[in-house]
Image: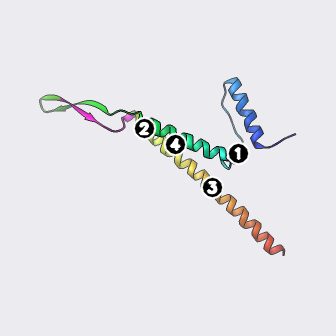
Amino acid sequence: MRLGPFTDILDKMQRAAKNGERVHLDFEQVRAFIGSPLYSTLNQLHAEEVEQSWQSRQPVSRLVSSGSTIEKTAMTGASAGMIDQLVQDAESKLVLEGAQRTILQSRRNRRSQSIMQNTTSQ
């Protein structure tokens, strides 16, 4: 007996945790997950992780050549290695926002079609 996408998702997650493997979700399961409160919670936890990573960054100190002497100059901001992570975080956020917009538009379209069918059938 198939109960629904969340039972399948939970089964896959438990199996992956037990076997140390990745979780692979079908499109139906992804849509169910994104449309659930779990997705909002995951987004909030992700935002907290990103904020914590920003708070843990320290200014980078570099030696800069200035004429005939070498002076130590404090440089603040992301180092070259951190830029990639910032770009990846921004890309992830854009992908998630795009998925949310797609789901909302899909729901609106379904409601619209349902309303149109109800008015034409009467």
Q: Residues within 10 Å of mark 4 (few under 14, many from 20)?
A: some
Task: Give the alpha-carbon distance from disc 3 to disc 2, as whole Å.
Answer: 30 Å
Residue 28 image point, x, y percent: 73, 46
Q: What residue type is labelled 3?
A: Thr
Answer with mark 3 or mark 2, whichever residue precedes in sequence: 2
Q: Residues within 10 Å of mark 3 (few under 14, many from 20)?
A: few
Q: Which amino acid does label 2 sit on?
A: Trp
Q: Which residue is drawn at 48% across and 39% down?
A: 50
Task: Give the alpha-carbon distance from disc 4 to disc 3, as whole Å.
Answer: 21 Å
Task: Give the alpha-carbon distance from disc 2 to disc 4, as whole Å.
Answer: 11 Å
Please tell me the numbered disc located at residue 102.
3
Q: Residue at x 72, y 42 (%)?
A: 26
Q: Nearer the viewer, mark 3 or mark 2?
A: 2
Range of magenta residues: 71-80
* 53 with respect to 46 (left or right): left
* Res. 121 image quadrant: bottom right
Q: Hey, which residue is sitting farthest top in the picture?
A: 19
Task: Give the alpha-carbon distance from disc 1 to disc 2, as whole Å.
Answer: 33 Å
Residue 12 image point, x, y percent: 73, 33
Residue at disc 1, secondary structure:
helix
Magenta stretch holds residue 21: no
Q: Which residue is drawn at 69% across and 59% down?
A: 107
Task: Give the alpha-carbon distance from disc 4 to disc 1, as whole Å.
Answer: 24 Å
Residue 105 image point, x, y percent: 64, 60
Position above or below: 90 against 52: below
Please tell me the numbered disc located at residue 47.
4
**Residue that numbered label 1 is attached to:** 27
Q: Which amino acid does label 1 sit on?
A: Phe
